[in-house]
Amino acid sequence: MIKDYEDFKKFVLQATGIDLNAYKERQMKRRIDTLISRNKYPDYEAYSKAIKSDSKMMEEFVNYLTINVSEFYRNPALWKTLEDVILPDLINKFGQNLKIWSAACSTGDEPYSLAMVMAKKVPMNKIKIYATDIDEQVLMKAKDGVYSANSLSGLPAEYKDKYFTKMGDRFYKISDDIKKCVEFKKGNLLKDKYPSGYHLIVCRNVMIYFTEEAKEDIYKNFNRALVDDGCLFVGNTEQIINHKALGYEFDKLFFYRKVKGV
């Protein structure tokens, strides 16, 4: 019997592997209550039974839960810093075969943006970007590589003209050359084992939804996943106040380096 939100959180963890305790409660509960009301279910118990018995409803619930908002080249000034400062330094230190991880990659806008920027620096056959997200629906969209014009609104014309084909009036398809640079895989930042040996990790505009405790754990795990002097690139609302305690040193705004020997 699922009587309240606490019981519902336990159900979600068991059914999906998503731990709602790691998300800011007021914000997440409001989203879920709105969803239940919109679907005309009277309570958590009824909604739980519905999504448990209908795989499509469960997929839609997870998709709604994971708050997928993404776009190409989001915050252009930061991407220019990546292109002009961070990547040249990483390539100089570690060579052209950089290991790059786009964590919480959503619909693929971010890892594909990374691949396009990297293609200005190294041969395309050397670009290997690992991209993960908890939501299988958005990963399917990422693999398809078809995007609305709105998703590309901030993308410089040099990339749009070179790597996209227009489909009708409203959609664009990304080139196979860029798609081949990215490997997509399901991944849960709150429970899965983290990979290692990365020179650059990009995780932007997702940490704002987590509790302080969950954020600290994730930043520590990212630190372990980086090589010494590797770089973490975060969102423009996600400045890491206690970065020194977590094993990072400040590089540029929203870029953090792993301290050697940590």
Image: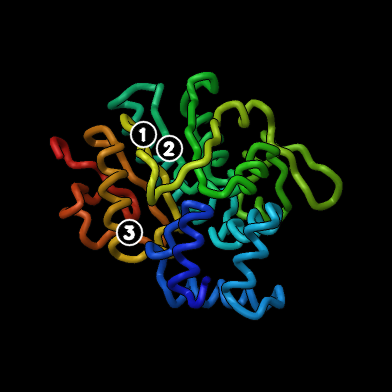
Task: Assign the C terminus to one quadrant of the image.
Answer: top left
Please name the amino acid that badge 3 sits on.
Ala
Say if mark 2 contacts mark 3, CB within 8 Å.
no
- Against 181, residue 257 (above or below) is below
Question: Which of the pair 153/27 is nearer the observer?
Answer: 27
Along the polypeptide, which appears first: circle 2 or circle 1? Answer: 2
Q: What is the distance, in whole Å, between disc 2 and disc 3 at their CAs?
A: 19 Å
Is residue 148 visible in the rendered image? The answer is yes
Say if mark 2 contacts mark 1, CB within 8 Å.
yes
Residue 68 in the image, given as x and y percentages of width and height: 57, 57
Q: Which residue is label 3 attached to?
A: 214
Q: Which residue is label 2 attached to?
A: 101
Residue 103 in the image, given as x and y percentages of width and height: 45, 44
Q: What is the distance, in whole Å, between disc 2 and disc 1 at their CAs?
A: 9 Å
Kindly state the secondary structure of the residue where label 1 is placed: loop
Q: What is the distance, in whole Å, between disc 1 and disc 3 at their CAs?
A: 18 Å
Q: Which residue is label 1 attached to?
A: 195
Give the residue drawn at x 61%, y 77%.
Answer: 34
Question: Which of the pair 83/60 is nearer the observer?
Answer: 60
Tag in front: 2 or 1: 1
